[in-house]
Amino acid sequence: MYTALNHLHSYWAYFTLLVLAIAFLNAMVGYFKNKDFSMAKDLRISLFALIFTHIQLLIGLILYFVSPRFSAWQDGGVMGNDLLRLILIEHPFTNIIAVALITIGWSKHKKEVSSKRKFGKIALFYGIGLFLILLRIPYMLWFD
Ligand code: HEM
Ligand code: HEM
């Protein structure tokens, strides 16, 4: 269970970051070039990014509790150990906030009428979300 989920979370992360980056850049281009927000392309890209991040969140939440590192909460020393603190506190905490911001951006873009403001909401919230995610990825485990 743990190994499978860990692999899934690890590989899904590539797709999530890729689609998020595409959605962010697409929104930046749309915003600064004053493009029309299209249902066929722009809405779909933003929705894909939202779905990919939500799936990553769900896998991450389950992984958290099945990971052997979780028992460190009982054994103690989580705060004092850089790797444990990253995996059990910083990474989940930062990413839950990031996914919440991305979801808020998605919700807010729906309420906007003008294309410019739709792109603006996606660019701002997805951009901050992506930035936060990249800040606290356990890269040493990922590329190991
Ligand atoms: C821990 C798991 C999850 C949480 C806490 C969560 C939370 C949320 C929240 C709060 C919204 C509301 C956004 C709004 O106001 O429009 C939302 C929307 C959405 N979620 Fe999730 N979600 C989770 C997992 C998933 C998964 C696994 C999928 C896909 C397989 C998914 C797909 C979607 C989609 C497509 C929407 C957008 C609905 C729309 O606006 O048309 N979510 N989610
Ligand atoms: C939403 C964006 C997220 C991304 C892009 C992401 C990405 C990653 C990556 C790349 C790794 C390293 C995997 C490896 O060892 O190869 C990892 C590990 C991990 N992630 Fe996430 N993650 C996200 C969200 C979350 C959330 C919300 C949680 C928990 C609530 C979580 C829990 C974990 C845990 C527990 C590990 C370490 C598993 C272990 O080695 O025992 N992740 N994550």
Image (spheres, rainbow, N blue to C red):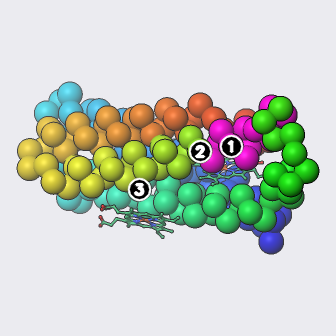
42 to 27, vertically: above or below = below
Residue 93 is marked as 2
Task: Classify 10 Å Cα crowding around label 1: few (below 14), some (14-19), many (20 and above).
Answer: some
Q: Secondary structure at mark 1?
A: helix
Amino acid carrying mark 3 in the image: Leu
Whether label 2 lies within 8 Å of ligand 2 gets the answer: no
Q: Which residue is mark 1?
A: 89
User: Which residue is painted at 21% across and 33% down in the image?
Assistant: 31
Q: Is residue 43 visible?
A: yes
Instruction: Look at the image and say whether residue 98 sits in the magenta stretch.
Output: no
- Tag 2, which secondary structure? helix
Q: How far is disc 3 from disc 2 in space, using C-alphas?
A: 18 Å
Marks 1/2: CA–CA distance: 6 Å
The residue sitting at 83% across, 32% down in the picture is 80
Secondary structure state at the residue bearing disc 3 = helix
Of the residues under marks 3 and 2, which one precedes in the sequence? Answer: 3
Q: Bounds of the magenta span?
A: 81-92
- Residue at (53, 49) in percent of width and height: 96
In the image, is the residue at mark 3 within 8 Å of ligand 1 by its beta carbon? yes
- Give the quadrant of residue 77: top right
Which amino acid is tagged 1? Ile
Please rate how many residues cluster around mark 2, counting C-alpha atoms within 10 Å: few if below 14, some from 14 to 19, many from 20: some
Image location (x, y in percent) of residue 14:
61, 48
Between 113 and 22, the residue placed more toward the observer is: 113
Question: Percent from the top left, x then y, of residue 43?
Answer: 26, 55
Provide the residue designation for mark 3: 50
